[in-house]
Amino acid sequence: MNVQLKRKIAFALSMGVVTTGIISFALLALNMGFSDGFALTWLRSWGIGYVIVIPAILLVGPRLQEQVERWVH
């Protein structure tokens, strides 16, 4: 595996952690408030979101990046 591919995978994994964590926290706080069980519900939602978003980033990301490159140039 080349260095460029490793960087892309590491970036996708890192971005997945950050974005799913922030979004799941914000949406749960807005919809549920900080009630009993918030932390466990948030961690569960965060985990589910992460499992969904990583394949999406890895599969959709390169195609979207190509489209952006076409639009910019």
Image: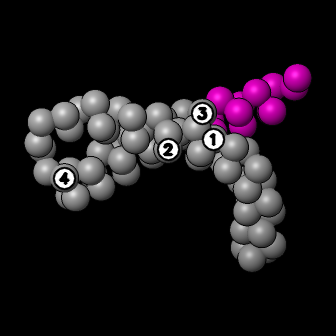
What's drawn in magenta, residue-wise?
A: 1-12
Query: Dot 3 lies on which element?
Result: helix
State yes or no: residue 17 in magenta.
Answer: no
| Separation (CA) of disc 2 from disc 3 | 12 Å
Q: Is residue 14 visible?
A: yes
For residue 54, the mark is: 1
Disc 1 residue crowd, few under 14, some 14–19, many 20+, Cα 10 Å = many
Query: Dot 2 lies on which element?
Result: helix
Q: Is residue 18 visible?
A: no
| Contact? badges 3 and 1 (CB < 8 Å) | yes
| Contact? badges 4 and 2 (CB < 8 Å) | no
Disc 3 residue crowd, few under 14, some 14–19, many 20+, Cα 10 Å = some
Q: Residue at label 3? A: 13
* Quarter containing the N terminus: top right
What kind of residue is marked 2? Gly
Q: How is the image coloured?
A: one colour
